[in-house]
Amino acid sequence: MATFRDNPYGAFNFLVALGTGAEETVVGGFSDVSGLGFEVSYSEYRNGNEKFNTVRKVPNTHKVDDVTLKRGLIGSTDLFEWLKTVRDGTPEVRQVSITLLDEARQPVATWTLRNAQPKKWTGPTLAAKGGGEVAMEELSLVHEGLEYK
């Protein structure tokens, strides 16, 4: 997939697949994806007979960050309906993938969120001040693992 090169890839060319099974159907493109990350926790441990008077760091569990997707409001209720389904007691986990594309729109990197579920939907901020802003919606996702290839 990713090919090493001198110039970094642009962050403006990507696809988001929400794991609905209909990946060829695009319903509104996302303008922002944030929160791709994870952190490993470490425990401190020291033997009584250690030569150096310091603790060792032993890796244990890891935690993943929530991922936020943003897009212009297009009249589709798919994101809101997914969260509503969970709210009403029917968890719907999905494998969400974010694919970075190069200038020729070829995939160069993919991040997959394992067992993603919606956590929070935020609707647009509406203001009658005559600006040219776009009405945006956000969806925050929790997940159980991040894979990168």
Image (cartoon, helix red, strand yellow):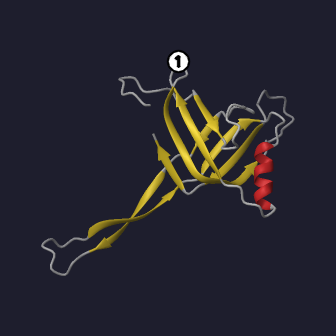
Q: Residues within 10 Å of mark 1 (few under 14, many from 20)?
A: few
Is 64 rendered above or below residue 123?
A: below
**Which residue position is annotated with label 1?**
104
The kind of secondary structure element at disc 1 is loop
Position of the N terminus by quadrant: top left
Q: Image height check: is 58 above or below 5? A: below
Outermost right residue = 128
Horizontal and vertical percent position of residue 50? 16, 75
Using the rendered view, name the quadrant where residue 25 is placed.
top right
Q: Residue at x 46, y 43 (%)?
A: 148
**Horizontal side of residue 49 vs 28, given as left or right:** left
Kind of residue at badge 1: Ala
> In this picture, is 58 found above or below 26?
below
The quarter of the picture where residue 74 lies is top right
Q: In percent of the image, x 74 and y 50: which residue is there?
A: 121
Query: Depth check: 102 or 137 in front?
Result: 102
**Residue at the spot 80% in from the left edge and 49% down from the top edge:** 81
Tell me the quarter of the image containing the C terminus.
top left
Name, please, the residue furthest toward the bottom: 48
Q: Residue 79 at what x, y percent from top left?
A: 76, 45
Q: Along the horizontal axis of the image, is 31 left or right of 101?
A: right
Residue 90 screen position, x and y as percent: 77, 61
